[in-house]
Amino acid sequence: MIDVALCPSEIHRFESIDLSETTAVVFDVLRATSTMITGLEHGVERFFPVETVEAARALKIQDPSLLLAGERGGLSLEGFDLGNSPAEFKEIRGNRVVLTTTNGTVALHRVRRAKRVYVGALLNLDSLAQVLDREGATGVLIVCSGTGEDFALEDAVAAGGLVDRLSHNSLSDAAVLVKSLYREASSDLLSYLRQSRNGRSLAGIGKTKDVEECARLSVTQTVGVMHDDTVVKLT
Ligand code: MLT
């Protein structure tokens, strides 16, 4: 069965649910998971996704060689090395990065006990689907990170793109819904991302380029996977 968690209120439940037989795929298309895929593609060694700014700072105190990255309200945080724009992560090859974002890293944290946890983006959709099909995963939970406490259009579109690519034929109602949405959106993904609440917020703070970057479909073979509460490139 492929199921989809459409919004954060569904995600909150997962910490108390047994996910030991579940393969989870987390999408935060604008921008956390797109940023991680971009970083891993360009040689970032490892991401440490954490829920809070305080947790990020505490990790840096333990290991000053870590880079601190993230956002609140889309904007970089005081004293951090990087924000949450994918382009910033193309030049930091070899580094290990602590990342804290409003929704994406929180969603990853909530499902970290699943059998496998993959990081999804429009950027790597074809490769991600190939990996899941190859594994023959039977219980797949696609997690849409959302915006604040709300549903986010861009995550649902990407979730639908993944459902559309998987050979699995047992779909929950939510999986059928997002698959239809993707088929409607796929001829112009950038327009969908631009009209989303996140897309408009990012444009409002001068980050239109990030939206364009994250709307590109299957441009990398990089797949991120969680390992010991960190995210690394699947090899
Ligand atoms: C999030 O995790 O909520 C997003 O990545 C926010 C953002 O676009 O910076």
Image (spheres, rainbow, N blue to C red):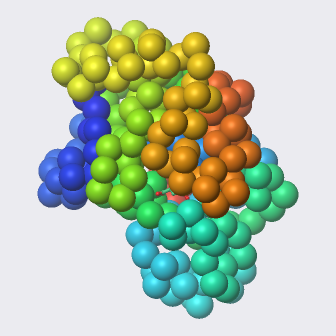
Q: Quadrant of the N terminus?
A: top left
Would you identify the image quadrant in which residue 142 lies?
A: top left
- Work out whether residue 190 or residue 222 is closer to the camera in this orientation and state it: 190
Q: Position of residue 94 (x, y in %)?
A: 78, 61
Q: Residue at x 15, y 57 (%)?
A: 16
Q: Vertically, is 38 above or below 138?
A: below
- Total residue callouts: 0
Residue 43 seen anywhere in this rendered image of the structure = no
- Work out whether residue 45 or residue 171 is closer to the camera in this orientation and state it: 171
- Work out whether residue 144 or residue 204 is closer to the camera in this orientation and state it: 204
Q: Residue at x 58, y 28 (%)?
A: 191
Q: Residue at x 24, y 26 (%)?
A: 174
Q: Residue at x 54, y 16 (%)?
A: 186
Q: Quadrant of the C terminus?
A: top right
Q: Vertically, is 150 above or below 134?
A: below
Q: Vertically, is 101 above or below 34?
A: below
Question: Would you say 150 lies left or right of 119 here?
Answer: left
Residue 64 seen anywhere in this rendered image of the structure = yes
Q: Position of residue 226 (x, y in %)?
A: 48, 51
